[in-house]
Amino acid sequence: MKIFVLLGSLSAFLGVALGAFGAHGLKSRVTPEMLTVWQTGVLYHLVHALGLVLIGILCHLLPDTSLVRCAGWTLLGGSILFSGSLYVMVLSDIRALGMITPLGGVAFLVGWLLLAIAVWQQAA
């Protein structure tokens, strides 16, 4: 599905922009600890943006792509929950938002597992 290549590309663009914002705009405004939290959000954001592009390509290469599509939506949700919660936590200094972050991490794990299952099924 082209949607995942589009979403992945836009997500990568946003990840680079947010990384630059953290490096230049937040450096003097937040603690080093919170800047590290921001950088973690950016890292996971960018890795999973590339994952979305990969999933978009695999949607065209694999004959039955329902699990691959599900993996894509799960990775996107994980990015929003994981990285998004970290970004908002740093900007708002509401530490309780860190409780949302693990939900995004679980979504990442599920998304990658779904992708592995989809590829495994194609190989069998």
Image (cartoon, rainbow, N blue to C red):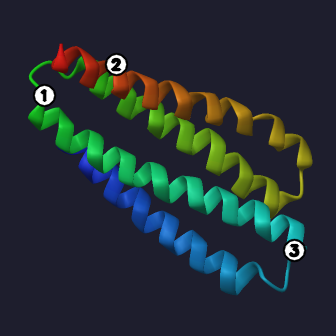
Report helix, strand or loop for mark 1. Answer: loop
Amino acid identity at mark 3: Pro
- Residue that mark 1 sits on: 62
- Residue that mark 2 sits on: 117
- In the image, is residue 18 above or below residue 111? below
Which is nearer the eye, 46 or 10?
46
User: Which is nearer the N-term, disc 2 or disc 3?
Assistant: 3
Query: What's the distance in space between the residues labelled 2 and 3, CA to CA?
Result: 39 Å
Report the side of 113 relative to 23 (left or right). left
- In the image, is residue 7 above or below residue 10? above
Mark 1 surroundings within 10 Å by alpha-carbon count, few (fewer than 14), some (14 through 19), many (20 or more): few
Q: Which mark, residue 6?
A: none
The picture places residue 78, in percent across and down from the top left corner, at 55, 37
- Residue that mark 3 sits on: 32
The residue at 76%/79% (across/down) is 26
The residue at 68%/75% (across/down) is 22
Amino acid identity at mark 2: Ile
Amino acid identity at mark 1: Leu
User: Which is nearer the N-term, disc 2 or disc 1?
Assistant: 1
Which is nearer the eye, 118 or 32?
118
Mark 1–mark 3 CB contact (< 8 Å): no
